[in-house]
Amino acid sequence: MQVSREIGARDGVQAVVVAMATPLNLELAANMGLAPDGDTSPEQLLIAIRADDEDALTGAVAAVDTALAARERSTGGTATAIPQRTVGAGLDELPSDGPALAIVSVPGSYAVAEAADAIAAGRSVLVFSDGVPVEAEVALKQAAHDAGVLVMGPDCGTAIVSGVALGFANVVRPGPVGLVAASGTGAQQVSCLLDMAGVGVSHVLGVGGRDLKEEVGGLATLDALAALDADPATERVLLVSKPPAPSVAAAVEEAAAKLAVPVRSAVLSADSPDLTAGVEGLLRDMGLDVPVWPSRPGPAEAPAPGAVLKGLYAGGTLADEAMLIAGPALGDIRSNIPLRPELDLGADFTARGHVVIDFGDDALTVGRAHPMIDPTLRLEAIAAVASSDEPAVLLLDVVLGYGADADPAAALVPALSSARDAAEHPLPVVIALIGTEGDPQGWSRQADALAAAGAAVFSSNSAATRYALDLLGAGK
Amino acid sequence: MTLGGILSGPPAIVAAGVSVFSDALRAQGAEVHDVDWRPPGFGSAEDLAAVALDPRRAAANRTAVERLMAAGSVLVDVRPARDVIGLADRTILHAGPPIEWADASGPLRGGLIGACLFEGWADTVEEAERMLAAGEITLDPCHHHRTVGPMAGVTSPSMWMWCLEDPVHGGQAYCNLNEGLGKVLRMGAFNEEVQTRLRWMRDVLGPVLQQAVRSMSDPLDVKSVLAQMLQMGDEAHNRNRAGSLMSLRELSPAIVAVEGWAASDIAAVLKFIGGNEHFFLNLGMPTAKLALDACRGIPGSTMLTVMSRNGTEFGIQTAGTGDRWFTGPANTPVGLFLGDYGPDDANPDIGDSAIMETYGIGGFAMAAAPAIVRFVGGTVPDALATTERMYQLTLAENPAMAIPIMGFRGSPTGIDVLKVARTGWLPQINTGMAGRVAGTGQVGAGLVQPPQQCFEQALKALAHEARAAA
C-alpha cells in the first residue's frame, strides 16, 4: 500500500494497485477497472496501473521496481530515544537499590505532581519551586512521612546530602554535625562557619521556609530530625530557622528531647538573634574552642553624623538576623520583610531612615533570577543610596557556593567604588561574606577583592552587623 | 526513617526544571539525570494537584493494575445474543458511547441497516432507515452489556457471540463472531453478500462452534493465545494472524468431531476460520474487556477502563468514575488505503476495539509487530518508539504480555489519565478504517489518537472526586 501511494502520486498516473493478488485485492482492483486477465493466485503480486500515456506508464512501472527494491532506511531497528517527561519516568530508569533523590524546580503550580512522583517511588525530593499551596505542602509531607522519605521544601534552596551540594550550598568539609534548616541562607551561614571551625557537616537537610509555621506544623523538621538521629555519621544536630510558630517550636523541642542525638537550636528570635552564637554554643558543647572568624575589617571609616543603616540583602534569613541584632540598638528598621507589620516598607526602597531590604523575597524574584545570580536590582539600590543626601552605612551580604554568581566581586567592586566616589558623604561598606575556602569562588579571593574596594568583610553576618552598628555609634 | 538511603551514600539525582542545579551537580561529579519536563498538555494546576495528591490514588491504581493483570479469560460457550445477554427484539448494540441515529456516521448506519435487514425487521434499506430514524429500534452501547464489538460493533439478537469467563474474578464478556475482511457489516456494508454471510454464520458457524466449544474438555485459554501471539508478530488489534491460526489449531479437533453436520459444512467452517486473519480479534477483545471490567469502581483510581468510538464520538471511562462516559469528537485515522480509496473516503474512528490498547496491547505493543508497521504507514523504529512512549502513559508493565524485541519487557499497561495530562501524549491506537459512506466497507488501516477533550473531562471529574473524598 505504501508503494501504491508513492506511485499514485506521480504525474500522469490515474490509478494504481500494487498488492498481493488476494481475493479482496482483486475485488478492489476490479472496482477500479484494473482486474487482471487470466488466472491469479494469492502469492502473486498484482501490479496494475492506469496512466495518461505510454511514457507515464513506463515511468510508473520502473518506479514500482525501484520502490520494491528499496530497503527501509532505518536506524538498525532501534527506537529513537523517548525523552522522560516526568520525575516518575526519570526515577523508573534508575536502579532500584542505590540511593537517589529528585530535585524539582518546575513552576510551583506544577511541582506538586512531580514531587508526588518521587514520594510514590520511595524517594526523597527537594522542591526548589515556590508558589506551592500550603495544603499541597502538608499533603506531600504527610505522604512522605508515611513513605519514610523527606520533602525538602517547597521553596527549599539549600541542602547537602551525603556530600552532594543541592541548590545554593557551599563546599563544606564532612563532619559530625547535621543541620535541619527551614532557612537556606541561614543554613549556608551555619555550615560555612562549621567548615571554618574545622568541624564540618554530615548532612544539611532543608525543610522549606514554611515548615515551622502553624499550618505545616514542622512535619519535615520532625522527620529530618528522626533521620539524622538514626544516621551514624551525625553526632550532633543544629536546627536553623527563621522565627517559628511558638506551638510548633514547642512540639519540635519536645520531639528533639526524646532523640539520642543532642539537638541544639539556632532558631532566630528576638531572644536569640544570632546564628553565629548558635554555632559557637555548639562548638562549646563539643568541647572545642571558638575560633576567630575570618574577617577583613580594614580601617574603621566613620560615616557623617546622623547616618542610617541601609541593609541590602540577598538572603532573607541574614536580613532577618541583621534586623534582630540592629533593631534594639537603632530602633525601628523598615523593611520589605518587616519584623512588625507597621514597619513595612511598601514599594519605596529609597525611604529615609534605617532600612533593610531582602532582594531574595518572592515578590522581587517574580520573572527574574534570585539576587545571588542576578545582582541588577541590588546594584541599582546601592547607586540610589550613594546618590541620596542621607548619610548611611551600607550593609550587604554576599553568598558564595554552588548556584551563586561565579565571581560576585567582579560586579560588586566597581559598583561599590563608583558609589563611594559619587556619595556626598563618606559611605562605609560592611559585607557579610558567606562562603568557604573550598567554594568555587574562594572565600579569601572574594574577601580580598571586596576589601580592596574599601569594604569591611566578615565571615559572620552578626559580626558584620555589629561592626556596622559600631560605625553608626550604636554598638555596645 | 531512612529517607530512601540518601544519608548512607551520595545519591543519584533526577532533576526536573531549571538547568543551573544540574550544572552545579555535574560540576561536583554527581550522577544527574535531567527530565525533559514540559508544562502539562492540559488540566488546571489545581485539578492536577488534587489528583496527584489524592491519598487514595496510589493504592487504588495498584489494585486496578493487579486486577487487570490477574484476570484470566477462557472460552466457555457460543450463543445467540438474544439468549446470552437477553437482547430484546428491535434492540441493536453498537460500538462506542451512546448515540442516536441522527448522529450516526455512515458505517454505523450501514451496520444498523444491515442488522434490521438480517433480523427481518425491514425488507428494504429504505424501510430500515425509516424505522431507525423513527426510533422504532433501540440503540445501546455494547459496553453497557459486558460486550464489545469491532468497528461498528453492530450486534442484533440473532447474532452468535463468544462467551468468555474470567476464572479469577468470575466476570463474563461477550463479542460477536468476526466476518472477515472487505465488504462486512462491521465496516458498514449491508448488501446481499453481507446478508448471505451473516445468515450462514447464524445457521452454520454459530451452532457448529457452540457444539465444538461445549465439547472441549479443556476450554480454550484465550489469554494464553494472546500472550503467545505477541511473540509471533501480532499486536492483537490490527494484526491477528498468529492468534487466528492458533485458535484454529485449538478449535479444529472439536469442530471436526461435532455430530449432525455435513462434511461440507464442517469444511466451510474450517475454511472460513482459516481464511480470516482477524478471526481472533473477537476473542481478544472480550479478553481485554474481562480484565478491564474487573477494574470497574475503584474509587481514586485514575486508570482507564474503556476507550471506544462510535464513528462520531470517542468515549472513555475510568476505574475511579464508574460508568460515566467522557466523550469528544472522534478523529479520523491516518494511514494507508486499499485500492484507490483515499483520506476523503475514511470515516472518523469507530469501534470498541481500542479496548486492546486500554488493555496495553494493540498500538501499545506496536514494537511486537514490526510486520504491521507498513500496513499502517510507519517504520520499525516508529513502532519501537511508539511502545517506548506509551510506557510513560501507563501504570505498569504486564509480564504476561511480553514484547520480545524490547528484551521481553512487559507491554505498557493501565493508561493513567494523570500521566496523559502531564506528558501531553495521547494513547496510540492501531485501527482499521471504514468507508465514510454507508455500505462501502473497509477502505484502509492506520493510526489514530483519542481527542484530548475526553481526557480533559476525565481529569476534571477525577479531581472533583478527589476533593469530595478529602
Image (cartoon, coloured by chain):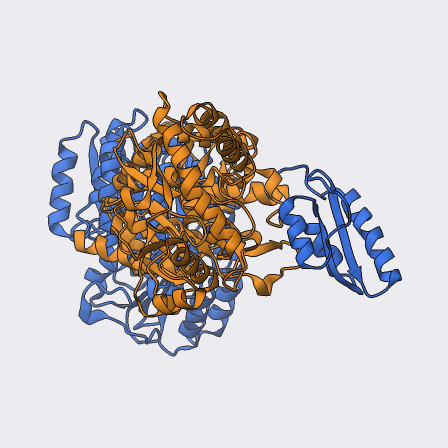
The answer to whether residue A364 is seen in the rendering is yes
The residue positioned farthest toward the right in the image shown: A55
Residue A400 in the image, given as x and y percentages of width and height: 45, 49
Q: Residue at x 35, y 33 (%)?
A: B69
Residue B429 in the image, given as x and y percentages of width and height: 49, 49
The answer to whether residue A180 is seen in the rendering is no
Chain B takes which shade in the image?
orange
Q: Residue at x 32, y 76 (%)?
A: A348
B245 is higher (above) or lower (below) than A417: above
A457, A115: nearer the viewer: A115
Chain A takes which shade in the image?
blue
A273 is higher (above) or lower (below) than A356: above
Q: Quadrant of the rendered structure where residue B8 is?
A: top left
Q: Residue at x 50, y 26 (%)?
A: B249
Q: Is A200 on the left-hand or right-hand side of A62?
A: left
Q: Is B301 on the left-hand or right-hand side of B191?
A: left
